[in-house]
Image (cartoon, rainbow, N blue to C red):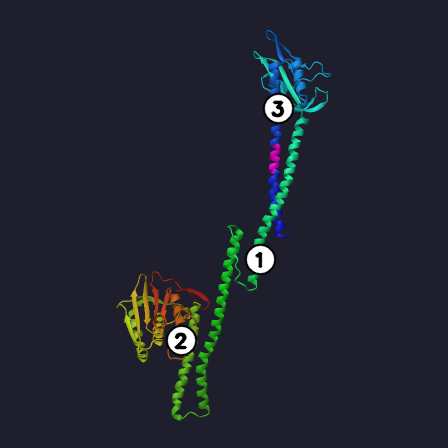
Amino acid sequence: MKLIYQQMLAFLGVILVTLAVISILFIRSTTNTVWENNFTQLEQYTEVLKNNSLVQVGDNQFMINSNFIATSENVLQDQHVHFIIYNSKNTAVYPTNSSRTPRGIDDDDWAQLKKGNAVSVRELARNPADGSQQSMTIYYKPVFLSGKLLFVISAFAPVETIQTAIGKTEHNLLIGFLLSMLAAIIVSYIVARYQVRRINQLRQATHQVMNGDYDAPIATKFKGHDEITDLAIDFQNMVNSLKASEAEIERQEGRRRQFMADAAHEMRTPLTTINGILEGLAYDVIPEESKAKSIELMRNETNRLIRLVNENLDYEKIRTNQIILKKTQFNGQVDLANIVEQLKQKADAANDDVVLNAPAELTVYADHDRFVQVVFNIVQNAIQFTDHGTITITAKNGVHQTEISVSDTGIGMTADQVKNIWERYYKADPSRKNTAYGESGLGLAIVHQLISLHGGSIEVDSKLHEGTTFSFTFPDEATAPKQKAVNNGEATEA
């Protein structure tokens, strides 16, 4: 069954139950009201008879004014109202000319009347007008004098009159019920169609997404604060996430292709050099005095390949958290000074000045070797991209962390270059792929992973042709996270 019909049946079911309950309550209320009005009317008639049909003929003696009662019955003949007068012995004294004497009042009702209580009943009784047995409404009213029961005035009318009034009410109610049902069908169809139309819009959007179209405006088509609108908003957020994921997958695929090309290029160059020298040696085309230099060149290229492979393995271990950091507390100023000294020759070759601004006691909590590796790679990277400039290393003890920055006055980077510098084999200046200091393009990728493992942070601020600043931190022992490393397939806490 289609959803629109399910929705219609649901709405109709609710409306039908509501109408049925209201109708039953209305009929019961109307019926009770009709009966109460009938008894109230009979009570009024008995009160009139009490005041006008009893004539006092002596001390504590009364006689019944039959003419007045007969006149009253004639007036009320359209309502089929009749009267019976009972004496204190429960014997009917009016009417006296009836073909059949009315039966006496039931004992239970008579007991109530003797107590002074009026009684109203519905029962099968003989109609004094024609003697037939009918369902009647009867109202008994006792008349007392000096605390003594004199008469009981009984007014009654056939139930048929009341049933006729109730039947008319039920007939009108049935017509209203049918009209309400027709209106309910129309309203339920409109509401169900509106709800289904919104669901179909979501379904259409799902097909668009399934076919690769992530640009369909979904949430803008839905107004309101109901669950379907919330579902549309969640679906729109999911589509946006899928779109972003697809863009990231495409970017990663592009980086993967670039990585394969760069890795092949980085490895092909030394292999080509080694192969050429080996062929020269095999065919004895290299002069004797150049063989030593050729062997040295092969050794350098072989070492370059080994470094390239080791850096890739190192990067993967760091990225997958397969190394254990042996953190200790030490004076980082000594290591910074050593790094400046080690790179002095490379800085001089580029006509760069390296300046160190650090306190004599620089407390660092980190893996000592990895700390040196991080700073060395960043300073070396600054020298690589700076000619005739200045590299400034600034360090200080911060709040629960060690803060270090490396600034240069080199070529700088664009925003896109800054966003990609943590990728493997990415180089901001492709023309320097084969320089002595930028041969692999893995240095900054390893730096980023190592700082993340330490629980620190690293930021880059760079402007093209103006220079670059790397700012990074190492948390102290109190705030440094415990590392979960994987060693030989087992998790180890360091």
Q: Amino acid at mark 3?
A: Phe
Image: 211 above or below 33: below
Tell me the residue at 48%/71% (across/down): 254
Image: 365 above or below 189: below
Q: Amino acid at mark 2?
A: Asp
| The quarter of the displayed image where residue 24 is located | top right
Residue 39 has which mark?
3
* Secondary structure found at label 1: helix
**47 vs 458, nearest the viewer:** 47
Which residue is the extreme one toward the top?
Answer: 58
* Secondary structure found at label 2: loop
Q: CA distance from mark 3 to mark 1?
A: 65 Å
* Secondary structure found at label 3: helix
Please state the extent of the stretch shown in magenta in the rendering.
21-28
How many numbered marks have been drawn onto this rendered protein structure? 3
Q: CA distance from mark 2 to mark 1?
A: 49 Å
Residue designated by label 2 = 429
* Left or right for 203, reference 408: right
Q: Is residue 322 visible?
A: no
